[in-house]
Image: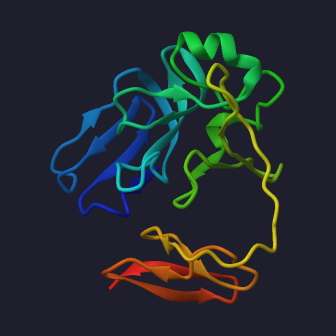
Amino acid sequence: MIVVNWATSGDLWISTDVGVFHSSDFAASFYQILGFTTAFGVALGAPKVTGDYPAVFASGVYGGVTGYFRSDDAGVKCRFVFPLKQNVLAEALSGFQINDAAHGFGAISANVISGDPRVYGRIYIGTNGRGIFYGDIKRVSSTSALAPTTSSTTNAPASTSTANPWGQCGGQNWTGPTSCGSGWTCVHRNPYYYQCLQQ
């Protein structure tokens, strides 16, 4: 799988049978992300801090463990992502695992992954016939791991803040920001989704 960084020209990621590779020079050269011996998929998602490098998600074998992983530092350190049942192991490995014995999501080698470009930590997993699963993270206390969350719709008044670059800025039932920052335009994508795009 090949994934491009939507925010940086020439920046791409590749998952292969021998690991994850990254290029920041239009594929003139690649470097291998240490720790991965096999990778089935790679994806980018919203960064932890607006304006930082996107979160990198990968499925494969990292440090001898098969699972779904996230890196918040362009692949320097990869982390398991959830659930809490793996907290003791995860803390020892500085992170969180998405899958465990009860949450296998089918054959990991056949699943497609995608990070959400608007919501930090959200990953989508296409399970080849078992539906599309997604997971969110939420800090539940200063001493606990990141936990799965659920979302709900409210009828709160529209926010007066500015939408993030590439973020949603309108649409039917949208209650968030409806304007974009300087150099960005709110573009109608469909009746439910308007997006901030560069002018």
Rendered residue at 72%/78% (across/down): 157
Residue 50 figure quarter: bottom left
Quarter occupied by the C terminus: bottom left
Q: Nearer the viewer, residue 134 or 148?
A: 148
Q: Position of residue 124 (x, y in %)?
A: 66, 51
- Residue at 36% from the left image edge and 36% from the top image edge: 73
Q: Where is residue 126 in the image (x, y as percent from the top left)?
A: 70, 51
The structure's colour scheme is rainbow
Residue 12 placement, left or right of 174: left
For the point 55% across and 9% down, the residue is 92
Residue 110: horizontal and vertical position, in percent?
65, 42
Query: What x and y, as percent, mark residue 70?
Result: 51, 35
Q: Relative to residue 119, is residue 91 depicted above or below?
A: above
- Total tally of numbered discs in the picture: 0
Q: Which residue is drawn at 35% across and 50% down?
A: 52
Q: In the displayed structure, does residue 94 sit left or right of residue 155?
A: left
